[in-house]
Image: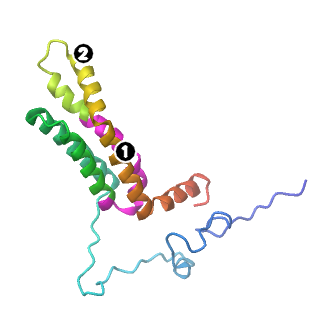
Amino acid sequence: MPPRETHGPDPGQAPYFVRSHGRGRSRDRSASHAGNRRRAAPGPKAGGAPRRTSRLTGRGGVLAITVFSFAGIMVAHWAGTPTAPGIAFTLACLLGAVLVRPSDLLSLSVSPPIAFFAAVVAAESLFALGSEGFTRTLLLGLASRLAEVAPWLFLGTALVLVIGVFRGLPGNIRDLGDQLNGRR
């Protein structure tokens, strides 16, 4: 058996069979040779207005989805509008996918159903506090709320994934694979 090759790709580069060859994000390779990783400051656009760079973190996006969902559940309970939690969740997913930093899209893309479930548990716990059978009331409230909002959950999660794909989610997945395989 021939000896195993010990050399690998250059530091900061994926193996030849994983490289995008012009697809996805491009980097300036000449700036990273000496370990000097400076980024150019964002300058004004062609119209002369400064570029706005403030973005939500992934955790902020998940928190926004949870808060919007909780508010929608409260509105649905008090106003009697069963579509309010679904609309609030979908709107929060849309805003989160657009406003979250591209580097945090991976954490946001898996979180919307979990965030909605946390909001439902919190809201239904509040609704069940004064009842005689707390556990029974909580479980029935959870089941009915999740059943009536299921199509909205699919829509919101699909929106996050589709928008995330166009904003750089495949690159995040590729970077995670590189990190897990020890290439970075």
Q: Amino acid at mark 1?
A: Ser
Q: Which mark is residue 120?
A: none
Chief secondary structure of the magenta span?
A: helix
Give the residue furthest to the right: 1
- Measured Cα–Cα span from mark 1 to mark 2: 27 Å
| Crowding near the residue tagged with mark 1, few <14, some 14–19, many ≥20 C-alpha atoms within 10 Å | many
Which of these two is toward me, 119 or 179? Answer: 119
Total tally of numbered discs in the picture: 2
Which of these two is toward me, 43 or 72? Answer: 72
The quarter of the rendered structure image containing the C terminus is bottom right
Q: Earlier in the sequence, mark 1 or mark 2?
A: 1
Write down the residue under mark 2.
136
Q: Position of residue 47 (x, y in %)?
A: 26, 87
Q: Quarter-wise, where is residue 131 in the image?
A: top left
SS state under label 2? helix
Q: Position of residue 166 (x, y in %)?
A: 42, 63
Q: Quarter-wise, where is residue 115 in the image?
A: top left
Q: Residue at x 41, y 56 (%)?
A: 162
User: Looking at the image, do the residues carrying marks 1 and 2 touch, with CB atoms under 8 Å apart?
Assistant: no
Is residue 3 one of those drawn in magenta?
no
What span is colored magenta in the figure? 98-119
Q: How is the rendered protein coloured?
A: rainbow
Q: Amino acid at mark 2?
A: Arg
Q: Position of residue 98 (x, y in %)?
A: 31, 61
Q: Residue at x 20, y 16 (%)?
A: 134
Q: Residue at x 39, y 62 (%)?
A: 102
| Crowding near the residue tagged with mark 2, few <14, some 14–19, many ≥20 C-alpha atoms within 10 Å | few
SS state under label 1? loop
Q: Residue at x 27, y 67 (%)?
A: 54
Give the residue furthest to the top: 132
Q: Which mark is residue 111?
A: 1
Is residue 111 one of those drawn in magenta?
yes
